[in-house]
Image (cartoon, rainbow, N blue to C red):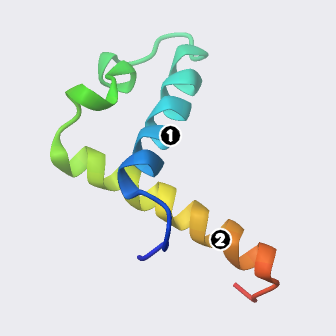
Amino acid sequence: MNTPGIDREHLGRMVREIWIVWAREQPHPKPSWLKPWEELSEPDREVDRRIGEGIARHVLEKERGDKS
């Protein structure tokens, strides 16, 4: 996916921050759910980047009035 003008790393970090907020709200979060971005494996970081890109793309398309 390509989101021109938006840094993939930033998007991934945002996804992770939101994930951790959610995890802290759970009664018994798994320790892995609470790992900060810096402690994630590269494959886990890539998943968060792709989620961030997908959301960003969706928002940008909606703002332009594109169909999705």
Q: Secondary structure at mark 2?
A: helix
Residue 21, compared with residue 61, is above or below; it is above
Residue occupying the far front of the picture: 5
Q: Looking at this view, is 5 or 34 the one in front?
A: 5
Q: Secondary structure at mark 1?
A: helix
Residue at 20% x, 51% y is: 43
Q: Is residue 56 left or right of residue 38?
A: right
Give the label on residue 58, or none: 2
Q: CA distance from mark 1 to mark 2?
A: 16 Å
Residue 13 location, x and y as percent?
42, 39
Residue at 48% x, 63% y is: 53
Residue 25, compared with residue 56, is above or below; it is above
Give the label on residue 59, or none: none
Mark 2, other Cα within 10 Å: few <14 / some 14–19 / many ≥20: some
Instruction: Identify the residue under disc 1.
Output: 14
Work out which quarter of the rendered image holds the N terminus and state it: bottom left
Residue 48 location, x and y as percent?
39, 49
Work out which quarter of the rendered image holds the C terminus and state it: bottom right
Q: Is residue 22 left or right of residue 46?
A: right
Q: Is residue 34 left or right of residue 11?
A: left
Query: Which three-letter amino acid code belongs to the residue tagged 1?
Result: Met
Residue at 54% x, 15% y is: 24
Residue at 70% x, 66% y is: 59
Residue 65 location, x and y as percent?
82, 84
